[in-house]
Image (tube, rainbow, N blue to C red):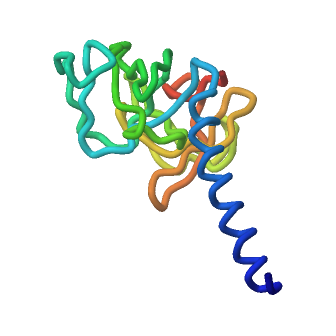
Amino acid sequence: MTPPDMRLALLAFSAVLSALASPATAQDREVPYWASIRATELNMRVGPSADYKIAWVYRRAGLPVRVVRVMEGWRLIEDPDGEQGWVVARLLSPDRTAIVSEGEPAPMRAAPSASAELKWRLEAGVTGTLGECSSGWCELRLDDRQGWVEADRLWGDDED
């Protein structure tokens, strides 16, 4: 085998190993863990099969969910309202998001401090990409906006 052929064979072998390792790693993940809805429409079912009745239809990609049980290609999730049901695993994303909980608008600040500059006020139900969390504050990104929100105003920030 010439060096370029050997390099191509090694790359192909590495790709096959990576493809085989990824699903196994995803299936071995310990519950509970956080995920978000990947699909623009997602059916929550009363059991882990398409044969079960649809209990709820989500039409909100990016909504944070807590995965509480894993069964083959299905995940038992809990949503921000505390509802639980089964969804197809491939329609969930490992990307962490958080949603602003009910109540007064949540201040989004320039830094993780109550005395930091107020950037925006976020209404309940606003969802964003979760960044780092520490000392009671979480970084939250909403499209082109980024800031810090008190962790107790968010659902989806608990460390598992």
Percent from the top left, x then y, of residue 60?
Answer: 29, 40
**Number of callouts in the render?**
0
Q: Which quadrant of the structure image shows residue 126?
A: top left
Q: Of 37 and 145, which appears nearest the observer?
A: 37
Q: Which quadrant of the structure image shows residue 11?
A: bottom right
Percent from the top left, x then y, of residue 71?
Answer: 46, 19
- Please report the residue visible at 20 percent of the width from the left and 29 percent of the height from the top: 57
Horizontal placement of 55 versus 63: left or right? left
Q: Of 129 and 14, which appears nearest the observer?
A: 14
Q: Which quadrant of the structure image shows residue 79?
A: top left
- Please report the residue visible at 49 percent of the width from the left and 22 percent of the height from the top: 67
Q: Of 104 and 1, which appears nearest the observer?
A: 1
Q: Quadrant of the N terminus?
A: bottom right
Instruction: Determine whether 19 is above or below 157 in the image.
Output: below
In the image, farthest residue toward the right: 3
Percent from the top left, x then y, of residue 41?
Answer: 24, 40
Percent from the top left, x then y, of residue 140?
Answer: 55, 44
Q: Quadrant of the C terminus?
A: top right
In the image, farthest residue toward the front: 1
Q: Of 111 and 11, which appears nearest the observer?
A: 11
- Please report the residue visible at 61 percent of the width from the left and 23 percent of the height from the top: 158
